[in-house]
Image (cartoon, rainbow, N blue to C red):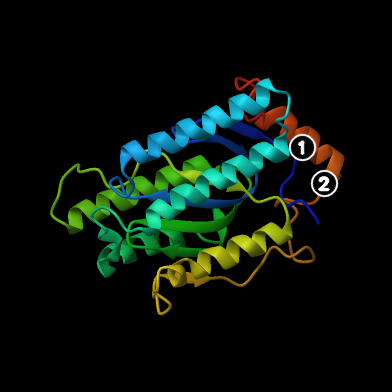
Amino acid sequence: MPHYFDYRGPVRRRRGKYLPHLEVDPGIYFVTFCLHDSVPKKKLARLGEERERLVAELYNAGKLDSARLYQINGEYFEQVDDLLDAGAGSRMLANPHVAQIVAGAFEYFHRDRYDLDSWIIMSNHAHVGLQTRKGHWLSDIMHSWKSFTANKINKLLGRQGEPVWQADYFDRLVRTEEELERVRHYIWHNADAVGQDDWKWRRQYERRWKEEEKPRELGRPLCSEEESKAWWDEYAMPDSDWSKSNAA
């Protein structure tokens, strides 16, 4: 399968509250971000501690590689997503006026700073599949979405300076076309999983980064499986030098 980002391009890395964030320019991502009260903090902390303990045990035993770490991170996200689907908190995204603000933010820079593949806005969280365009980093896009929508939502609800979103977010680099299809399917059917098969706040887009149509500046399959593994071992493993980044 082709790899859908340029492994030789610029890289950004930082340690987030939940998981390390690994960004490339450009890249395809599956992103989840949540309302500030959507998951009980103690449960979220416990899941994070369990993940860290498992990673440390495997690493110390010499049994951790980048593929296993990727799997662990995926399993951790699934546990968090189950908590989100329980629908805890204020559930303000169920308000159609609030959901429209978030949907409008997604659409605003579509085909400019990024290309949307699919999104869904649930009652207390949102999932997005997107490909960033050259020079536009995911962390900057997320900051723009969250700050803009928080201001608009607070104004709509007659509030001032109240927290709307959790400080961090979950993101995963999408590495193959097969994985992108799984992400697309997961996003679209997230509402179905909780009995909302007529859910309005979701959308899929016509693909415009098929290989024959893909602009040259977007991600291309530029490396072999061996190069891919070496890249992940260099940037994603616990013993990676997290001060290292080749982004400008």
Secondary structure type for disc 1 = loop
* Numbered tag placed on residue 222 in the rendering: 2
**Position of residue 61 measured from the top left corner of the image (x, y, whole percent):** 70, 23
Q: Is residue 204 above or below residue 32?
A: below
Dot label at residue 8: 1
In-image side of 74 versus 43 (left or right) = right
Q: Which residue appears at 51% of the width and 35% of the height?
A: 19
Query: Picture quarter containing residue 210?
Result: bottom right
Between 28 and 125, the one nearer to me in the picture: 125
**Amino acid type of the residue tagged 1 in the rendering:** Arg
Q: State the residue at coordinates (45%, 64%).
A: 120
Q: Can residue 116 be seen from the camera position used here? A: yes
Residue 104 located left or right of residue 93: right
Q: Is there CB contact under 8 Å for labels 1 and 2?
A: yes
Is 157 on the left or on the right of 23, as rendered? left
Q: Residue at x 50, y 58 (%)?
A: 128
- The C terminus lies in quadrant: top right
Measured as percent of width and height from the top left, residue 78 is found at: 51, 51
Q: Looking at the image, tell me whether mark 1 or mark 2 is earlier in sequence order.
A: 1
At 32% across and 62% down in the image, what residue appears? 123
In terms of image quadrants, where is residue 160? top left
Residue 152, given in percent of the width and then of the height, sits at: 26, 54
Q: Is residue 52 above or below residue 100?
A: above
Residue 120 higher or lower than 84, as above or below? below
- From the viewer's perspective, is 112 left or right of 45? right
**Spatial CA span between label 1 and label 2:** 8 Å
